[in-house]
Image (spheres, helix red, strand yellow):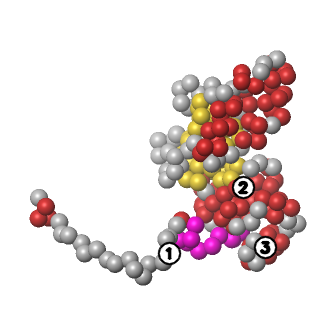
Amino acid sequence: MLQDFKQIRLQDTTDVEYILSPENSSSPTSLHSSALDVFTDFTLVSPVTAPESMPIEDALDYMKSQHVRMLFVLDNHDNFAGIVTAADASGRKVMAFMQRDGVSRDQVQVRHIMLSKLNIRALTYPQLKDARVGDIMLTLKGSGEQHVVVVDESSAGVFRIRGVISTSDISRRLKIGFDVMYEAKSFADIESVITQGG
């Protein structure tokens, strides 16, 4: 059976100086780049999820350990129920729930704080494929959100979460800070910062 294969000659690495990474393997991202450049596609990367019964403190710790600022929340049947962000889990929403229901912080669960799927607005994957990074930035700025969920429909007609775009991913790819993204008076200001390298 091994006769079907051949041994490949190994090469010397003496002259190799760089290690390629996804960030520098493609051309730089700009406002005119495809929105797919800043899209986290769940056909390629697993989503970070949490059960709705998870204590809110554990959810915050989990977000930190996974280096994300949002979790997709699953119900008892592992179906999509909503999202919870780091801002929601560490901010006023938790305090308001504690005061309203007379509970301590360790009794607060993700289900109490999450944004239900009934209240989430999303982009469709076809919309995303036709969009540019600047379109997504304008959409996020208009919604006031830090994330936008992207949905698609399977060949069997089942709707599912296809992925997500976050302001932090856009900021990282454009190599500019959040403050620049949101305080800029125009996209020309942002383009100017991008071209000047930060």
Residue 7 x, y percent position in the rendering: 20, 70
Dot 3 crowding, Cα within 10 Å, few <14, some 14–19, many 20+: some
Which image quadrant is residue 137 in?
bottom right
Badge 1 element:
loop
Using the image, tell me which numbered label, if any, was put on residue 193.
3
Check the image and report above or below for 120 versus 163.
Answer: above
Image quarter where the C terminus lies is bottom right
Q: Comparing marks 3 and 1, which lies closer to the viewer?
A: 1
Q: CA distance from mark 2 to mark 3?
A: 17 Å
Q: Earlier in the sequence, mark 2 or mark 3?
A: 2
Image quarter where the N terminus lies is bottom left
Q: CA distance from mark 2 to mark 1?
A: 29 Å
Instruction: Please provide the residue range marked out in magenta.
Output: 23-32
Q: Earlier in the sequence, mark 2 or mark 1?
A: 1
Q: Amino acid at mark 2?
A: Thr
Check the image and report above or below for 152 versus 95.
Answer: below
Query: What residue is drawn where x is 78% and y is 19%?
Result: 103
Q: Earlier in the sequence, mark 3 or mark 1?
A: 1
Q: Which residue is mark 2?
A: 167
Tag 2 and tag 1, C-beta contact below 8 Å = no
